Image (cartoon, rainbow, N blue to C red):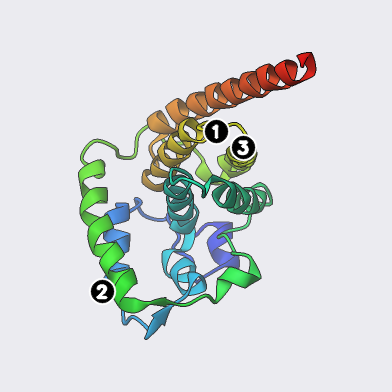
Amino acid sequence: MPSMEHARYPDLPDETVAPARPTSAVLANLLAADLPATVTPDWIIDGLGQRSYGLVMLLLGLLALMPGLSLVAGLLLVWMASQMILARPAPTMPRVLRRRAVPTRRFAGLLRRLIPAMRFVERFIHPRWPTPFAATQRGLGILLLLLGISLMSPIPFTQYVPAIVIMAMAIAYLERDGVMLAGSVTGALLSLAITGAELWVAYSGAEAL
């Protein structure tokens, strides 16, 4: 029987009806589709459906690792996390980015590099400890909101740990791996504790001057 979410949003794949396909297969289908002349975030999100949260999360984690881009990644992550907390079926990007076109050739090249990497990851990560991911979406959203704020910390080199944790959460979310999800949630809590301690030390040192 189709889920209530699929009944409300019939354009999204109903992954409660059949076992979830590997993310690499979803991306391969997207690559094999009739690609438009230019690709927009809206088109990608429509094509990925429920997987779009995990993929956007993964891309933002990668973005946060790049020098000088952790603030941008943090802001976008806070935006996306707020939609997860509101239980939106798929993320929407800020209006300024929604229709920003990317050349199809560049997008297709990115998918051709990403698909083999996901196939390699899927050899070790797969659906385990089935969890109601729709029900845990709000909890993950709260954690991602806090991680996004931590990415905006003014202390240098503090973005690496939360960025890696975000990427681990993204892969667990994409592959419906409850074991990895539990580990990444623990990592997120540790990352937030470390960032909080670093901010406290920095604040205490500034007050002592």
Residue 162 place in picture, x, y as percent: 51, 34
For label 1, the residue is 156
Secondary structure beneath disc 3?
A: helix
Q: Is residue 1 visible?
A: no
Q: Earlier in the sequence, mark 3 or mark 2?
A: 2
| Disc 1/disc 3 C-alpha distance (Å) | 28 Å
Front in this rendered view, residue 2 or 198:
198
| Rendered residue at 57%/60% (across/down) | 91
| Disc 3/disc 2 C-alpha distance (Å) | 34 Å
| Rendered residue at 67%/17% (across/down) | 201
Rendered image: mark on residue 139: 3
Closer to the observer: label 2 or label 1? Answer: 1
Front in this rendered view, residue 64 or 92:
64
| Disc 2/disc 1 C-alpha distance (Å) | 42 Å
Rendered image: mark on residue 32: 2
Q: Earlier in the sequence, mark 2 or mark 1?
A: 2
Extreme residue in the bottom direction: 37
Seen in the image, is 147 located left or right of residue 66? Answer: right
Secondary structure beneath disc 2?
A: helix
| Rendered residue at 60%/42% (across/down) | 148
Q: Which amino acid type is marked by label 1?
A: Pro
**Contact between labelled residues 3 and 1, with CB atoms less than 8 Å apart:** no
Seen in the image, is 18 located left or right of residue 4? Answer: left
Residue 103 place in picture, x, y as percent: 37, 78
Q: Residues within 10 Å of mark 3 (few under 14, many from 20)?
A: some
Residue 43 place in picture, x, y as percent: 46, 74
Q: Which amino acid type is marked by label 2?
A: Ala
Quadrant of the image containing the C terminus: top right
Seen in the image, is 44 located left or right of residue 198? Answer: left
Q: Is residue 38 visible?
A: yes
